[in-house]
Image: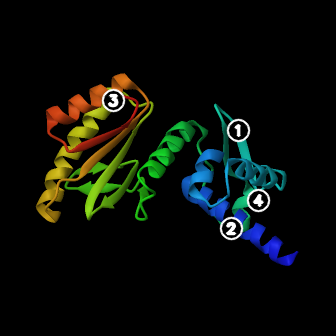
């Protein structure tokens, strides 16, 4: 009985720690990120954690989970209050993290400064020692995207001079039209890129 209780607590703590790092997650994402023995079992565990007031959820196209204050207290989280208007953006970034094989050195929103320039990628990690910058195309205007791509082109030169490689700019978009537009802009400006999402 005690061993079962300890196992349950460890599993719940893992889920809370994952939410501490990733803010919002669906049951499908949690099922991919944690060894929870299938989607039905994942939903049962999350439902129990909600009843125990460790998690809160909201219904979108699917249920989205995040930590309650009680959940934060349990793991000693200092996570600030989450912005609900960032849910879709965050879920998209989490989807891409899973698609890219859950890179161990993935960092969300780490500011980059060079000269008088500054940019905050949605995430950054290294692949075979080369920088990979993540941009989630959700609600920002294409004009903002173009400005970002120009900044990444400048940053690419700096990184090449220092690290002898050109970083990749990785986009994730759910719009076929925007997918084609981002491809065109990256190619026109000569930026190394990959695009995930709808063609």
Q: Quadrant of residue 190?
A: top left
Query: Residue reaching furthest left?
Result: 161
Query: Residue reaching furthest bottom?
Result: 2
State the quadrant of the C terminus.
Answer: top left
- Asked whether disc 2 touches disc 3, contact meaning CB atoms under 8 Å apart, the reply is no
**Residue under circle 4?**
70
**Residue under circle 3?**
179
User: On the rendered structure, is 65 left or right of 177?
Assistant: right
Is label 1 or label 4 in front?
1
- Whole-number angstrom distance, CA of label 1 to CA of label 4: 17 Å
Q: Can you give x and y, in whole percent of width and height, for residue 12 in the image?
A: 72, 63
**Residue under circle 1?**
58
Vertical arrangement, residue 90 with respect to residue 14, above or below: above
Return the mark for residue 75. 2
Is label 2 or label 3 in front?
3
Q: Can you give x and y, in whole percent of width and height, for residue 7 in the image?
A: 75, 71
């Amino acid at each position: 009985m005690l061993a079962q209780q300890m196992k349950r607590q460890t599993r719940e703590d893992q889920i809370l720690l994952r939410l501490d790092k990733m803010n919002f997650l669906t049951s499908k994402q949690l099922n991919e990120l944690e060894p929870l023995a299938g989607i039905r079992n994942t939903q049962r565990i999350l439902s129990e954690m909600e009843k125990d007031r460790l998690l809160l959820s909201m219904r979108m196209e699917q249920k989205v989970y995040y930590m309650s204050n009680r959940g934060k207290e349990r793991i000693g989280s200092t996570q600030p209050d989450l912005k609900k208007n960032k849910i879709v953006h965050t879920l998209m970034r989490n989807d891409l993290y899973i698609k890219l094989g859950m890179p161990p050195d993935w960092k969300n929103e780490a500011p980059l400064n060079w000269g008088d320039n500054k940019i905050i990628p949605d995430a950054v990690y290294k692949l075979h020692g080369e920088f990979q910058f993540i941009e989630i195309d959700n609600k920002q205007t294409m004009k903002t995207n173009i400005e970002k791509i120009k900044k990444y082109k400048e940053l690419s030169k700096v990184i090449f001079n220092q690290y002898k490689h050109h970083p990749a700019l990785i986009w994730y978009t759910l719009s076929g039209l925007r997918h084609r537009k981002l491809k065109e802009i990256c190619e026109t400006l000569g930026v190394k890129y990959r695009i995930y999402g709808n063609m």
